[in-house]
DNA sequence: CACAGATGTGCACACGTGTTCACATACCGT
DNA sequence: ACGGTATGTGAACACGTGTGCACATCTGTG
């Protein structure tokens, strides 16, 4: 057993060579002891494990990844959490990645305030990158392709961009819930919109307008919000001020709908007798007992599973053709329609 | 200009050596061109940048980190998001880390379902690890110390564990808001508790009981929840069924309080005339117009700043003594007390 | 005995970087 | 002329791993 080679006096991480010296074996033996299927004599192996445990040795995953192995890092570009459904999605995605032995490197916000861009993350030899549709660009796809980093996009279809994608059919989901309202005899529709330029926002609006047009109707009132409760509340107050005969308020997402419910209550309106309210996404708040919101599901679990599946497919076969998976939203009938 | 060395036929990341070959320079020149202060002749430098841009070259951050540099990875162990305040905190922490040039490696859930432990993350040469108090253990501290990984704990004080910590004075905050209720003449207190065994849960309960004891009062009713809206709603229904003269419902967190508000409304109770309701944390929902919840702030920004400051201090001086920062909560008076 | 397979071994190499070092050139001041 | 400084250069080394390779021993089979 070699003398303690002054580990404590050094701030460096414990290395395999240090363990080898202490255990009186070669570095190869240490490496083999920590590699599945590696040949090391049982007694030697035991000694290596003991010394390693005593000194807190763990192989350095990043050094190992240089060897043509994978880093196991997956960048998750989560956007700005404007829609709370996104934060629920992100955390579930991160959990699922962990379950697959992958480590999410989180980019929680991509804007100028954070001084960070997705491209900064490409300095890491990522196994993959998962990114919201809104942050996609053709140049980013090219960059990732050149670096051999698989890219999976969620939340929107990609047009002529070649990458894997998972998205929810926003327009179709919106049509479904408008059909429910029409079937209940609602005719005077108001819309609490999300911020324009966001694909989900725009597609949900399109689905609403198309469904109304097919029924020979037009929107009576529209007010924009930023996908949050406060904006939904204010937009609804303005809408009811402008048109007192609104009988259905369709909202671009659940938080807007929760805000609408709050505003209607403050106005003494009865939901759904006086006016229906619907949301989109089936976020957790939609299921709270005081709301029991009728909404359209943008189910997190199937989307997360699809993303993970696409990653694994890509890691198995980098040259596979790109694939797009669509999630079909379903109406969740509760108490507000 | 050397011939294209078959980059496209290889799935490997573009390397500095490949760029050097293409640009007709040494690898050292490429390295210097991408290192601040590195000496490279201007014309050569330009050529290197052009070739690099054409082939999507970026230095591999992980290879570079082997050179005694830092990985810039910070593990963020975020727990299970039982309390929605935690997801807000985590998101903001990750943004702040990005701003400091650090990359959060997110462990979104540490339980058996994910098959992941914090120790798995220690295989990466992390610059630091930020962890919720509930996931702390002395053995983890020892392990990190041996690996030279600084650890910052948030959410609870550490007892005799040697690590940096930031936490909110839960008990003191609770006393403050109970004093507000006492000053309003409330005498019949009910408590919607959080899950036992969570430090914040237990401390907030202790603060409540102590404040009441000092006023010569005892809790009239207590029901447990899991820090969420649904449990707050159900607990409040049970409480009002059990004791019809409750005049103040103190909740362990804001989501429980939001649930309590919903339950009281369904019972036709007027808040705050009939009964006061208070929360804890000042999560975003506390500020929604239909709730306008009186609560205690557990301010995210100062906590995040403190965590980042502790990380930077540790990175500057690994041997610095451990430090504990306390965040003083403040009462946020709104409409429910 | 020869061969094949299993187990075991340490040396040397590769992975992709940044840095050190010795050498080179140019310029300025003493 | 000499010394110091700035700029520039490529070879070699270091970082911390996993792997390939040649060699060694043992066992079983034909």
Image: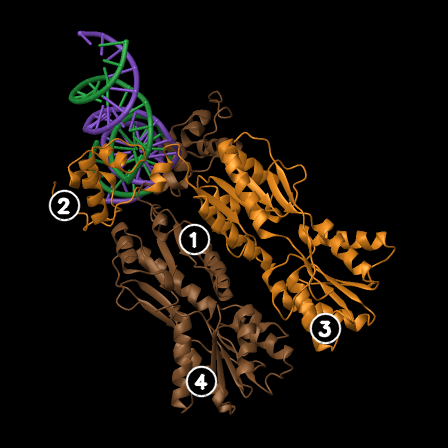
Chain colours: A orange, B brown, C purple, D green
x and y percentages locating residue A84 in the rendered image: 59, 60
**Quadrant of the rendered structure where residue B272 is?**
bottom right
Q: In the rendered image, which residue does mark 1 sit on? A: B107
Residue placed at 45% from the left, 47% from the top?
A99
Vertical order, B172 against B128 (above or below):
below
Real-space Cα separation, disc 2 to disc 1, in angstroms: 35 Å
Q: Where is residue B1 shown, x and y percent of the image?
A: 47, 22
Task: Please tell me in which quadrant of the rendered image residue A290 appears.
Answer: bottom right
What is the distance, in whole Å, between disc 2 and disc 4 at their CAs? Answer: 59 Å
Relative to A7, A120 lies left or right: right
Badge 2 is on which residue?
A: A4
Asked whether the residues under the numbered discs 4 and 3 touch, taking CB atoms below 8 Å apart as contact, a structural biologist would say no
- Left/right placement of residue B318 relative to residue B263 reads left
The residue under label 3 is: A264
Number of on-image labels: 4
Residue ID for mark 4: B219
Residue found at the very far right of the displayed protein? A216
What's the distance in space between the residues labelled 4 and 3, CA to CA?
Answer: 36 Å
Helix, strand or loop at mark 1 = strand
Q: Are dots 2 and 4 in contact, CB under 8 Å?
A: no
Write down the chain letter for disc 4. Answer: B
Are discs 3 and 2 located on one and the same chain?
yes
């Amino acid at each position: 057993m070699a003398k303690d080679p002054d580990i404590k006096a050094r701030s460096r991480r414990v290395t395999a060579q240090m363990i080898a010296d202490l255990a009186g074996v070669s570095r190869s033996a240490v490496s083999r002891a920590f590699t599945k299927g590696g040949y090391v004599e049982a007694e030697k192996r035991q000694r290596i494990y003991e010394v390693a445990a005593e000194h807190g040795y763990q192989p350095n995953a990043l050094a190992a990844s240089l060897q043509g192995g994978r880093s196991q890092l997956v960048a998750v570009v989560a956007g700005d959490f404007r829609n709370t459904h996104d934060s629920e999605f992100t955390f579930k995605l991160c959990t699922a990645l962990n379950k697959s032995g992958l480590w999410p490197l989180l980019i929680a916000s991509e804007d100028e305030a954070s001084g960070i861009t997705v491209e900064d993350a490409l300095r890491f030899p990522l196994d993959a990158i998962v990114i919201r549709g809104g942050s996609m660009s053709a140049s980013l796809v090219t960059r990732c392709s050149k670096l051999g980093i698989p890219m999976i996009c969620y939340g929107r279809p990609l047009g002529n961009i070649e990458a894997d994608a998972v998205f929810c059919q926003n327009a179709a989901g919106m049509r479904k819930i408008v059909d429910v309202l029409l079937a209940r005899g609602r005719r005077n529709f108001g819309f609490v919109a999300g911020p324009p330029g966001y694909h989900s926002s725009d597609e949900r609006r399109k689905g609403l307008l198309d469904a109304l047009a097919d029924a020979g109707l037009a929107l009576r009132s529209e007010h924009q919000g930023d996908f949050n409760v406060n904006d939904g509340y204010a937009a609804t107050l303005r809408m009811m001020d402008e048109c007192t005969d609104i009988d259905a308020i369709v909202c671009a997402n659940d938080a807007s709908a929760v805000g609408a419910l709050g505003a209607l209550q403050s106005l003494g309106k009865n939901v759904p007798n006086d006016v229906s309210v619907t949301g989109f996404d089936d976020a957790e708040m939609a299921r709270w007992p005081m709301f029991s919101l009728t909404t359209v599901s943008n189910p997190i679990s199937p989307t997360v599973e699809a993303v993970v599946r696409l990653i694994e497919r890509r890691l198995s076969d980098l040259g596979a053709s790109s694939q797009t998976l669509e999630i079909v939203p379903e109406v969740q009938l509760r108490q507000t329609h």
